[in-house]
Amino acid sequence: MTRSLPMIEARKKLTQLPEQLERHPGTLTVTRRGKPVLAVMHWDLYETIMETMEILGDAELMAQLKQSIKDIEAGRGIPWEQAKRRLRP
């Protein structure tokens, strides 16, 4: 969910924003004269978005993802417990 906050209020509340965004995840739109000028978000959300963009921009990773989805839809796969056992050293 996106909330909006005028620049002057954002300045006053800057030190409170991390906790506010942790309690109410999403983005905060900072406006100047009623127009959006900044988007503020919790760091975890930013990292998630950047990781997603990296995957979407990598043709090889996207091909693997699409193939994995097809495999799951076709019933090709193994149960989670079996996969965990295979991963244990």
Image (cartoon, helix red, strand yellow):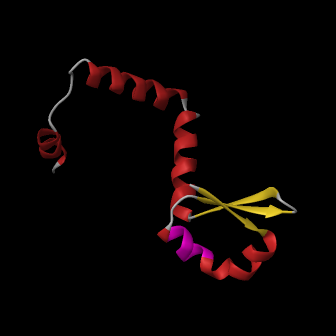
Question: Which portion, as a residue range, is magenta?
Answer: 17-22
Q: Main secondary structure of the magenta part?
A: helix
Residue drawn where x is 59% and y is 34% of the image: 57
Report the residue that reaches farthest toward the top. Answer: 74
The correct choice, above or below, for 14 with respect to 86 in the image is: below
**Residue occupying the far right of the picture:** 33
Whether residue 52 sits left or right of residue 66 in the image: it is right
Residue 78 highlighted magenta (yes or no) = no
Residue 68: image location, x then y, percent: 34, 26
- The number of numbered discs placed on residues in the rendered structure image is 0
**Residue drawn 61% across the image and 58% down it:** 27
Q: Residue at x 48, y 70 (%)?
A: 23
Q: Nearer the viewer, residue 58 or 11?
A: 11
The residue sitting at 54% across, 27% down in the picture is 59
Which quadrant is home to the N terminus?
bottom right
- Could you tell whether 8 is left or right of 88 in the image? right
Residue toward you, 48 or 2: 2
Q: Is residue 27 above or below residue 83?
A: below
- The vertical placement of 49 against 22, above or below, is above
Relative to the observer, which residue lies in front, 62 or 74?
A: 74
In percent of width and height, residue 56 lies at 55, 34
Q: Quadrant of residue 74?
A: top left
Residue 35 point in image, percent of width and height: 83, 56
In the rendered image, the vertical position of residue 86 relative to residue 5, given as above or below: above
* Residue 72 sits in quarter: top left
